[in-house]
Amino acid sequence: MKISKRLETIAELIPSHSKVIDVGCDHALLDIYLSQEKGCECIATDINQSALDQARYNILRFQVKTITILLADGLEGIPISDDDIIVISGMGTLTIEHILEGRKLPKRMIIGTQTDFEDLRRYVTSLGYRIQDEKYVEEKKKTYVIIDFVRGQENYQEEDYRFGPVLKKNLRFIENERDKVLEIIEQIPTGDTELEKKKRILKELEDLRKNL
Ligand SMILES: C[S@@+](CC[C@H](N)C(=O)[O-])C[C@H]1O[C@@H](n2cnc3c(N)ncnc32)[C@H](O)[C@@H]1O
């Protein structure tokens, strides 16, 4: 079965035969892929009934028997064991925080987002996780960051939160982020306080790039 490069990158991080809780599964294509290709057992949840109807249709179509579908707001009422792997992808950082807040969470969580990577890193590490790996995916002119969090502690510097302890060594990521900041700077009027902030970030990115 063929899935998007973004979902495939998430799947590559998940060991065979894992038990996965996919929050916001939508079509459940990731779950079907993980079940078929890696022998995983999945709980596919979504807050939206029509998403789950589509998920159920896909699961039946691919004749997969190791996926349980649950209607839920985030992790509300979802049974979680320490060895499960939570996957959250395709949501904004505020929604992710709402989903994780006050929950008993497993050892490992793989979270993909398009924006606010810095806030996401700060928040999840504040819950007692460290960053084991990070992936950068470019697909259909969009870019995605996928972060593999495991329970633990690490002393991070500001640039680790901002650009990622793994991604700060990724030239492609750094150059793309630099280009995005440059584009924003061109639109900010002179004298605006935001301009100085963006120029500082640009300098940090340039320094990282020069050292790669
Ligand atoms: C853009 S889709 C992403 C689907 C899939 N995870 C992916 O990465 O391709 C986001 C999904 O998250 C669901 N969602 C949004 N907020 C949610 C919440 N609080 N709890 C569960 N699902 C949520 C939406 O209904 C939607 O199906």
Image: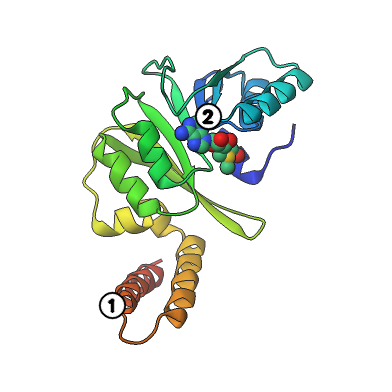
Q: Position of 25 compared to 134: left or right?
A: right
Could you tell me the amino acid type at mark 1? Thr
- Name the residue located 35 percent from the left edge and 53 percent from the top edge: 118
| Whether residue 9 is visible | no
Q: Secondary structure at mark 2?
A: loop
Q: Secondary structure at mark 1?
A: helix
* Corner quadrant of residue 196: bottom left
Q: What's the image's color scheme?
A: rainbow
- Name the residue located 39 percent from the left edge and 15 percent from the top edge: 81
Residue marked by disc 2: 47
- Name the residue located 29 percent from the left edge and 59 percent from the top edge: 159
Q: Position of residue 51 (x, y in %)?
A: 63, 31
* Corner quadrant of residue 61: top right
Residue 152, compared with residue 180, is above or below; it is: above
Q: Position of 96 compared to 142: left or right?
A: left
Total marks shown come to 2
Q: Position of residue 197 (x, y in %)?
A: 30, 73
Residue marked by disc 1: 193
* Corner quadrant of residue 110: top left
For label 2, count other residues whose C-alpha is less than 10 Å away and answer few (under 14), some (14-19) or many (20+). Answer: some
Quarter of the displayed picture in which ligand 1 can be seen: top right
In primary-sequence order, the first of circles 2 and 1 is 2
Residue 23, compared with residue 3, is above or below; it is: above
Out of 47 and 161, give the one closest to the viewer. Answer: 47
Is the CB atom of the residue marked by disc 2 within 8 angstroms of ligand 1's nearest atom? yes
Residue 104, compared with residue 111, is above or below; it is: above
Could you tell me the amino acid type at mark 2? Ile
Q: Position of residue 23 (x, y in %)?
A: 50, 30
